[in-house]
Image (cartoon, helix red, strand yellow):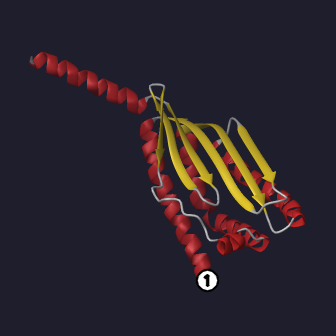
Amino acid sequence: MLTVVLIILFLLILLTGAFILTPMEFGVEIIRTANKNNLYLRFKIFAIPFKIRLNKKKNKEKKPKKKENSLSFENFRKNVSEFKEIYDTSKDHLRKMLAYVRRHSSVKSVDFQIKFGFDNAATTGISTGAIWGMGSFILKVVDSLIGIKKINMQVYPDFNNKLFEIYSKTILIMRPIHFIIIIRKLVKTYLYINNKINNIKGGA
């Protein structure tokens, strides 16, 4: 009986070690619309797909007035300016985090889609180039730091409606042990950048 128990424990240890050290597929999916702000973690265990929602908050519909303000061209231009300032002040921290990701993983693919419309057709048309440029800049920075095998970026301007929707899905190949470490680093980086954002807004 003792021998059987030891054999079972030994097999469990081997399976756990194989699980932790065997490269697996992980994915992060972001869906952001007027009524949704969802963040999902996707992964496969022994070819079985799993999907976990990371943000548990219920989606709430925004008030029409607030929606109009958030979709104004001036607000968009301000957000682009703040994004550049945040990147300039946080790029060293981001590079260190992404350097670790590059050493211990490979990015299989990145899907990045934006649907948007502003106050009028002319403003939407002018903004299209800026949004393409900002999206391309983000992907270029990430690609230069960690490498992306496949990139699919789409920008869909809507000249008839006011909206701003984002869909993003990133698939990485890495070992679970490294994934756990990377998640910790991502959280640390997020808190660092969030602090920078609060400082910028506080000083405005």
**Residue closest to the eye, 49 or 82:** 49
| Amino acid on which disc 1 is placed | Gly
From the viewer's perspective, is residue 22 above or below residue 200? above
- The x and y percentages for residue 50 are 47, 36
Q: Identify the residue at horizontal 58%, vertical 42% (top origin).
A: 102
Quadrant the C terminus occupies: bottom right
**How many numbered circles are shown?**
1
- The outermost residue toward the left is 1
From the viewer's perspective, is residue 182 above or below residue 21? below
Rendered image quadrant of residue 176: top left
Residue of label 1: 203
Q: Secondary structure at mark 1?
A: helix
Quadrant the N terminus occupies: top left
Q: Identify the residue at horizontal 73%, vertical 60% (top origin).
A: 163
- The x and y percentages for residue 65 are 67, 75
Going by the image, does 39 lie left or right of 142?
Answer: left
From the viewer's perspective, is residue 73 above or below residue 137? below
**Residue closest to the eye, 24 or 41:** 41
- The x and y percentages for residue 44 are 48, 32
